[in-house]
Structure formats: structure tokens, C-alpha cells
Image: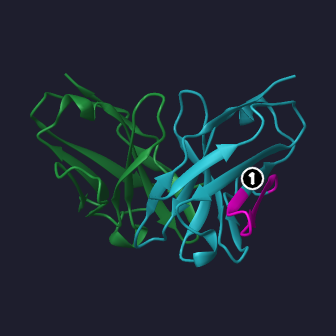
Chain colours: A cyan, B green
Amino acid sequence: QVQLQESGPGLVKPSQTLSLTCTVSGGSISSGGYYWSWIRQHPGKGLEWIGYIYYSGSTYYNPSLKSRVTISVDTSKNQFSLKLSSVTAADTAVYYCARDAGRLRGFDYWGQGTLVTVSS
Amino acid sequence: QTVVTQEPSLTVSPGGTVTLTCASSTGAVTSGYYPNWFQQKPGQAPRALIYSTSNKHSWTPARFSGSLLGGKAALTLSGVQPEDEAEYYCLLYYGGAVVFGGGTKLTVL
């Protein structure tokens, strides 16, 4: 059973960089075949895809966030990470990590989510 | 900017059948968009239900089914249970990107 767990600060100051890590257990990021993704959900709103990383390090980002987003992977720790720069209150959201098994098999496993509040 | 549109809300009686749809601003939704469907209950993470239009995950109850209907992706719940009250999101693949629909709040009443 694959499990994903987000971790990181719950409070970030405006203009700073939001940093989160997703730890994967029950499966190896290095095994390939999966796109390790970040999704966020503003309070009371819908889901917004942020981007993904493949185990090789290749990435794809939501064009609306691309200038501020970096997703990286550490296969030795079986983790992948999200950095979102120059945050504002509009970046306050629950951030989820999830596994995308590709178009033919879709998204399957999600983390429980972590609330990040941007406030001074 | 690609927009994926769902019904904002629907109401169904217990034991009834309801169909939720997912439309794309780019035109008809086909199997090539590999539609996914997710269920989200308050305070919980989304749970995957359907992938690649109509395929169920091992944990997906049999009463949930996915299809294409009139140029849209569709999720049908047959024999609705009270515990099916939730927000439902679709997802479409556009090239390398992914876009979620705005969600449908399903009330079982």
C-alpha cells in the first residue's frame, strides 16, 4: 500500500518561499512509471494542479504558476519537494502530494494534505 | 486558459441514480483526455474513483461508473447511498498538463 505524507511549515510570510516535502512509503520513486505531483486547494474552493516530477528529474508545471514553482526529487530519501516563491495570501491553501500513474492508469494515491497559511 | 466545467451542485434521493458531467472549453471530451473522477468529503483528501474514462480502482464501489456522454465525461452513481454525499471532481489530461474541473457538490436527500 503506497502512502504519501506532506511535511513543512504551516505558516509562511508574504514574499518568502513556501517549501514542502512529500515522503513516499510502500513504493520506490526510483522504480519509474509514475509522475509525482503537487495539487493545492484554496479554502472552500476546488483543486488546482501545480505540477509533477518524474524520477529522472523531468518536470512539468501549471503555466499559471510556472514562474514561481520548482519541484525536485530526492530518490535516496524517497521524497519529492515543492518550492513556491514570492508567496502572497492568495497562496494560502491545503497542499496535497499525489501519485499520477500516467494517462492510462490515472491518479491513484494522495497524501492527507497540509494547510499552508501565508501571513505576516 | 483551458477551463473544465462541472455542475456546481446536484441533489439525488437515496437509492436513486445521478449523472455528473465534465466538459472542456476546448471542445468535446474524448477518451484521449483520459478523464479521472475523484470524491472528496469535508476535511479529507480526494479519493480516486475512476481513471481513463471508465476504469475503476480496486477500491471503487460498483455503483460508480464512468463514461462519455454527449461530448462530456460522465460519472454515474446508481443506487446512491447516504455516504455518497460529497464533492466530486473530474480531471482531464491536456498534453503534459492536467486540469481539474470546478467540482460538483452532490447532496443525498
Q: Quick check: B60 above or below B29?
A: above
Residue B46 or residue B69, whichever sits in front:
B46
Please, what secondary structure does the residue beneath circle 1 have? strand
Q: Where is residue A112 in the image (x, y as percent from the top left)?
A: 54, 41
Residue at the (17%, 52%) spot, across then down: B62
Specify the quadrant that holds the C terminus of chain B.
top left
| Amino acid identity at mark 1 | Leu
Q: In which quarter of the image is the N terminus of chain B?
A: bottom right
Q: Residue at x 31, y 57 (%)?
A: B72
Q: Residue furthest right?
A: A15
Q: Residue at x 53, y 43 (%)?
A: A47
Was residue A64 drawn as part of the magenta stretch in this picture?
no
- In this image, B33 relative to B77: left or right? right
Is residue A116 rendered to the left or right of residue A113? right
Q: Mark 1 lies on which chain?
A: A
Tell me if I can see residue B26 in this picture. no
Asked if residue A76 is among those painted magenta in the image, a careful observer would answer yes
Name the residue at 21% across, 48% down. Answer: B76
Residue B91, position as x, y percentages in the image = 44, 55
Q: Which of A42 and A80 is in front in this view?
A: A80
Question: Residue A115: in sight, yes or no?
Answer: yes
Where are the magenta residues, as a range?
A67-80
Relative to B26, residue A97 above or below = above
> Which of A78/B16 is in front?
A78
How crowded pointer 1 is (Cα within 10 Å; few <14, some 14-19, many 20+) is rated as many
Q: Is residue A15 above or below residue A5?
A: above
Identify the residue under disc 1.
Answer: A82
